[in-house]
Amino acid sequence: MLYADVVVDISAKDLDKIFQYEIPPDLEGQICVGMVVNVPFGQRDREIAGYVVGLTARPALETGKIKRIRSLKNSAETTESKMIRLAVWMRQQYGSTMIQALRTVFPIKARVGAKEKRHIILQVSEERAREIREQWKKKNCRARIRLLDHLIEQERTDYGDTLRLLGISKGVVDALKDAGLVQVVSEQYLRDPVVLSTDIGEETVLNSQQEQAVEDICQEWTEAGRPCLLHGVTGSGKTQVYMGLIDRVLRQGKQAIVLIPEISLTYQVVMGFYSRFGEKVSVIHSRLSQGEKYDQMKRAKAGEISIMVGPRSALFTPFSRLGLIVLDEEQEQAYKSEQVPRYHAREVAIYRGHLENAYVVFGSATPSLETYYRCQQGEYRKCVLDSRYQERPMPQVSIVDMREEIKRGNRSILSRELQEKIEQRLVKREQVMLFLNRRGYAGFITCRSCGYVLKCPHCDVSLADHNNGMSVCHYCGYTQRQQKTCPQCGSPFIGGFQAGTQQIEAVVKERFPSSRVLRMDHDTTRGKKGHWEILHAFQEQEADILVGTQMIVKGHDMPNVTLVGALAADMSLFAGDYASGERTFQLLTQAVGRAGRGETAGEAVIQTYQPDHYSITCAAQQDYESFYREEIAYRDLMGYPPVSGMMAILGFGQDEQQLEKAMGFIHRFICRADVVQGSQVIGPTVPPVGKVQDIHRRVIYVKDKERERLGKLKSQVEAYVQINTGFRGLQIQFDLHI
């Protein structure tokens, strides 16, 4: 006898569990994971649909108590069944409940009512309408005459717009309707968030490097079919290569998903794709209404669109003929989910591509170490664009040592060199971007006089100040008393960086009072169109200077920007994270790359207290290879990903003592487990944010060169937590870097 594990309703929290059903003999061999079945449910055995998420020969209850599947809802493999199989894989890979995984791959759970448009249509001839108009004129029916005149001119008009325009009531329309003069019709339509007047443009002419990249990737598709990395310098035209690849996929009758990391990129990217492919393109992101999201998924499932653009959730677009998945700026942290299951879009894209026989392409000027490492290992294929589109020169970059600025009496956030260059741009009517590196804000302690940074002696990551007067390592828990003076030079100027974008905006306005300044950060982009409005205004040259956080330096193409200033460039360099050097290099390289993308050559100024650090010098030179060699040697030495795998086991709970005790039990269980030979176990310790909304947090890190062992250990810890009552009331989550 075979049994199926079935999930019946992913929208109801009280049904967040798996139910087991018996597979009838006539359906044996037909039912597999991913299919949708009809099952009896509840005391009255009402028939509902359920997702099959597992098969087993072992009954969970006495066999007489297990109900039987009634029928198959879908006998053939469907898009929905593939998505269910994807959810099953995600649940096994990342650790979550089956419901959580299904809610991830089906992000739009509830049906949203369709939008309706109502029109008023004239039902009589123009001659008859004019006769009636003359009759009403004698009776002084002015409102009816206004409506009739409007319909004589247009014959068909929008219901709501007409009432507002003519200043008439619903009763006037009803009177004409009752007289048989007009008809009111309702039409359902799908919400389309892409409201662009752009005409479909001509096919972009690729240069020789871009053509070669397209050919190399297509060759890989026909031979080994490995994921491909398009490694192109900033401004090299990676998007045009994506379009060339998508064009080939569309000609085969297939569809494409283009992932972008930030909502702020949506406007420009969608506009580019829409101008090339027209109404085949749609977009989905978190700022859309539930109705807009629902309609885009509905359009995709019906085959009305062929290209979906959007951040991480667009990966789960229900295309039935998926041919290509593109991850632009694949190095971005936004592709990693902070919710359970803690998946990475890069890994899920590869698995979905495997399920759908679709190709996967990553693109970046600064690839993640994980992706580049896999290229070096032969798991991915690398294609290179090493020059800018139309042979435009790379920006000239200067590094300013802010320690010297302090010695010379300049305590402003703007160095003298940067101030001079801004002045020159304002005179020439060119634009400036000022990027404040807020990643890791106030997360590390540095000396402004000599650049010394307090680090953990065991983990080689920076210490962070806590309110209890201690400096703490968030990897191993090492603590020491906060320093009042610099241990290296004795200066009292030691502490966290305090400036934010609002302060920078105020400084710029004071120093350059005639300049027009825009600010782009979390506060100014809260609205649905916040990103679009600011970027559109800057692109239309309604401002001279754009001040912002990392969202302004990712992927935007502003031809009139000829100067970029990176303020506090080393802010992210010591953010208490083993990947902080990588993050810094990526941010600075992207920032520098915003300058000089038009006809005028660009410049960039990097302000730092660490002018000799390889992350900063390599970013200034746009030299990825040199950076990779330095960083991978550090990761190898310290046993960090991608050379070794690492898993974070995260605990959450309101009772701090219970959480401490439970995490201690997990630590002891791990140390006794068979699969951890050679593994390094660190913690439990307090993560960078130790409590949120009265929920305490703890973390254990496990590092192992054999990545498969971490996956097995995750499964063992999951089973251990599930059978022990001491973990009730706590949440245990897993974050794998393998």
Image: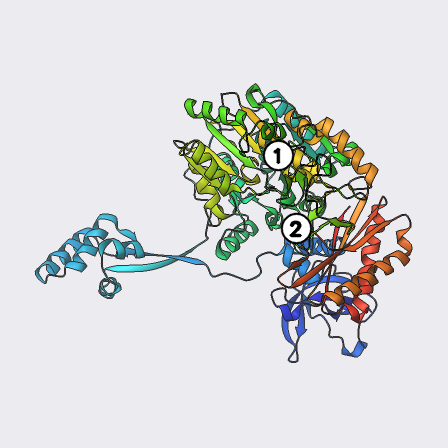
Q: What is the spatial separation of the Cα atoms under label 1 and label 2, in whole angstroms?
A: 26 Å
Q: Is residue 645 left or right of residue 279?
A: right
Residue at horizontal 52 percent and vertical 31 percent from the top = 557
Q: Is residue 596 visible?
A: no
Q: Quadrant of the N terminus?
A: bottom right
Instruction: Note whether 308 is above or below 168 in the view shown.
Output: above
Q: Quadrant of residue 613?
A: top right
- Direction bottom: furthest residue: 43
Q: Which amino acid does label 2 sit on?
A: Ser
Q: In which quarter of the image is residue 223?
A: top right
Q: Residue 337 carries which label?
A: 2
Query: Label 2 neighbourhood size at 10 Å, few (<14), some (14-19), many (20+)?
Result: some
Q: What residue type is labelled 1?
A: Ala
Of discs 1 and 2, which sits in the foreground? 1
Q: Can residue 414 be seen in this view?
A: yes
The residue that label 1 is drawn on is 569
Contact (CB < 8 A) between labels 1 and 2? no
